[in-house]
Image: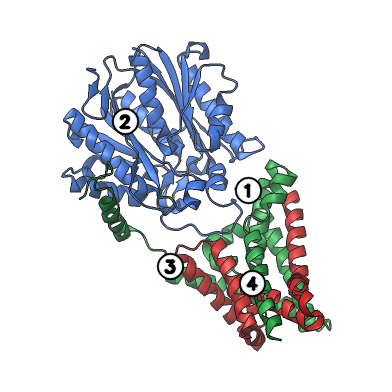
Chain colours: A green, B red, C blue
Amino acid sequence: MPASDGSEGQQEFQKWYQAQFNQVKPKPPIVKNALWAFVVGGLICTFGQVILNYFLGLGLSMKEAAGPTSAVLIFLAALFTGLGVYDELGRYAGAGSIVPITGFANSIVAPAMEFKREGYVFGLGAKMFVIAGPVIVYGLVTAFVIGLIYWLRH
Amino acid sequence: MQTYLMAFIIGGLICIIGQLLMDLTPLTPAHVLVLFVVLGGILSGLGLYQPLVEMGGAGATVPLPGFGHSLVSGTIEDINKYGFTGIFSGALRATATGITAAVVFGFLAAVTFKPKG
Amino acid sequence: MDKKHGKQSISFAAPPAMTATATVAGPMEGDGLLGGQFDRILEDNLAGQDSWEKSEAAMLEWAIRTAVARGGTLADIDFILAGDLLNQLMSAHFAVRGLGRPFLGLYGACSTMAESLLIGAILIDGGFASRVAVGVSSHHDAAERQYRYPTEQGVQRPPLAQWTVTGAGSAVLTQGGAGPKVTAATVGKVVDAGLKDVNAMGPAMAPAAADTLWHHLQDFGRQPGYYDIILTGDLGQIGKKLLIQLMQEKGVDIAANYEDCGLMIYRDDQDPHAGASGCAASALVLCAHAYPLLVIGRLKRILLIGTGSLHSTTSYQQKESIPCIAHAVAIEA
């Protein structure tokens, strides 16, 4: 085993130790996690389809119905985050409750609630976008770049 | 019944991809959300996401790549209608309901509830 | 310099006594393995305060006041040494705000209990103080929102993750006096094993613990068997395994009398993943569990190796690896 202290042999030690660590590092239960993600994510989407069908039934077009469907799901996610249920679901469901739009809503409500103690402007208002902010930033930049390419080619 | 089944399967599969990314790579949930929106946008630009929406319905629109798809398809729609300025107006117009709902409901929930820890 | 031993160790000419301790723990800790041994268990993580940070400060203040009141008054305390995990030692500073005693704030992440005992003993043996109160605290929710995600965010914890303990522990050291004595200590070096995964704090700290333990044994010419138990705080399951392995590489077998404080707080079914962490983990195990056993003589000699992961949220976002520290304190009945 290489020496762990001082600069001499430090890098060698770090390399050796990383290998030791990788040997005992516990792997996440990949199959179980994937199954949970599939079932919970699938169910949230199926529920989304129920709402979507309801709005379609009111005579809205597919495009018109998409917005209200998101809004209903977001409302429910905000409610369950507030009630302290959504994080418990997330412990098991992982990506199943992160990837749907409800997870996006959760990532807005969770910091907003928690940082309310630091005030309504710098706490709630600013921290609300800790995770949602990057999503909107990169989403809009992507849309801009693709829109520009589309415009140049037409 | 068929539409519900397809929504379940397509939505579930997209979530599995997200889960595998979190379990097998150092990506955090925030990274996965950002990545999915960008990927959804790119696939939409290539014309590959719309077929998925037709197949999976809410299974393709509810997960975050669907948000990227809305951003890009809205942009393209506005470019067709208004030309150059559509590049700037389409993305937020198409997603306005969702974003406003998230901010307003988020605000209300944060004002109403206390975190339980 | 006859109190300095070898490269990193010291022994005390007149070993200070630990005359009293006090502990307070959160509801989850109260429901855990040491539940019956804490002086006070909170009903919820807020404990009547309006933020988790205030709750943590209140716990620390309570622990220090209670330990001090067991055989003395605040006015007799020459110095208070305390620390916690929050930025700018928020809990410690607010805890001592109303105590009106000379104070030194210490940061050693989860090693702070060992660090404060070590410095407290130096102050007393050096003749600078006759009574010193030490204390540390940590709070799961306050730590979670500072280091990781908001608590209501639906994220999955990896199997490597450790659960920050909600609680506070305090001890009083006195010149002379009855009680277990702090006899020797080894001051650790910052050791960076190169790990970058912030969930792998235990594994990152194991080489620091190995380095300190090795030098402690060398400096005093001792075998691990000299101690009834060697306690690290807190490497967790994987870190513990790695420390045993690292010591084996150096030809020292510690498996027989070694335990980690991170594995002594929660039951497995409480789902703490790799174990407990936080300043309070080693403080609760020492003050609520090991100390009473030392007092009644069931334990004769223990070595507490406090281990700290010295990263910050800024350092890991800048992709730095995790520097770690470990300090050892020998306590003998």
Question: Residue visible at 32% across and 45% down?
Answer: C206
In the shown orientation, is residue C125 left or right of residue B18?
left
> For the residues tagged 4 and 2, is the chain the same?
no
Residue that carries the numbered disc 2 in the rendered image:
C187
Q: Does the residue at mark 2 contact the one at mark 1 (Cβ under 8 Å)?
A: no
Residue plotted at (59% across, 41% down): C44
Q: Which residue is mark 4?
A: A142
State which mark lies toward you, 1 or 3: 3
Distance Cα–Cα, label 1 vs label 3: 31 Å
* Residue B10 image position (x, y, % from top left): 58, 81
In this orientation, does residue B1 appear? no
What residue does disc 3 label?
B24
Q: Distance from label 4 to label 1 (Cα)?
A: 36 Å
The image position of residue C133, as x and y in percent, is 45, 21
| Whether labels 4 and 1 share one chain | no
Q: Nearer the viewer, mark 2 or mark 1?
A: 2
Q: Position of residue C125 (x, y in %)?
A: 33, 15
Q: Tell me the CA gap for discs 2 and 1.
A: 39 Å
- The secondary element bearing badge 2 is classed as loop
Check the picture and name the quadrant holding the C terminus of chain C: top left
Secondary structure, mark 4, is helix
Task: Using the rendered image, report if marks 2 and 1 lie on a common chain.
Answer: no
Q: Amino acid at mark 3?
A: Leu
Name the residue located 41 percent from the left edge and 13 percent from the top edge: C129
Q: CA distance from mark 4 to mark 3?
A: 26 Å
Given the image, what chain letter belongs to the residue carrying mark 4? Answer: A
Q: Quadrant of the N terminus of chain C?
A: top left
Q: Is residue B48 visible?
A: yes
Front residue (pair B36, A93): B36
